[in-house]
Amino acid sequence: MSIETRLAELGVNLPDAPAPAANYVPFVQVGDIVYVSGQISNGPDGLIVGKLGADMNVEAGAAAAKTCAISLLAQVKAACGGDIDRLVRVIKLTGFVNSTADFTDQPKVINGASDFLVEALGDAGRHSRSAVSAAALPLGVAVEIEGIFQIK
């Protein structure tokens, strides 16, 4: 089954890859590895902003992280010239969670991205990962995630 078909079954239609917001490129390809710049939480109603432990709970944070994973896949699709089926596997995610000093559930928040990628890609979606706290993120977003992917 193609990745696009599986995403459609999950009710996900990949958006156009978000344009960079500053002086950087959205992805860099070196051989068969694609390094995708951080993707911020963004839903149908715009940016998903908030601070975990203050005005957002883990479930809302995980939903925000899922939107980052969808944007990551959109960038990979762009890196593959529009053919997402060239994606071999997710190698690593680094997730940043806008959270209070006493919030310690960053891994549960980033699970929103990890769980989605495994659901969408099966074993190819299993990856290594870091989940860290940030005192603030660009534009006040709740989550930002960068990723490393292997393509063919």
Image (cartoon, rainbow, N blue to C red):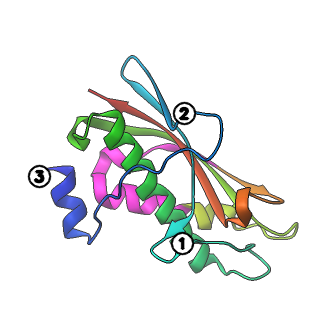
Q: Which one is in front in this view, the residue at disc 3 or the one at disc 1?
A: 1
Residue 26 higher or lower than 40, as above or below: above
Q: Which structural element holds mark 2?
A: loop
**Residue in the foreground of this view, choosing between 100 and 40:** 40
Provide the residue designation for mark 2: 25
Q: Is residue 9 left or right of residue 92?
A: left
Location of residue 102 (image quadrant): bottom right
Q: Callout 1, which amino acid?
A: Gly
Q: Residue at x 26, y 72 (%)?
A: 11
- Label located before the other in sequence (3 or 1): 3
Residue 133 position, x and y percent, is: 76, 57
> Cα distance, mark 1 to mark 2?
22 Å
Q: Which structural element holds mark 3?
A: loop
> Cα distance, mark 2 to mark 3?
31 Å
All told, the count of numbered labels is 3
Provide the residue designation for mark 3: 1
Q: Callout 3, which amino acid?
A: Met
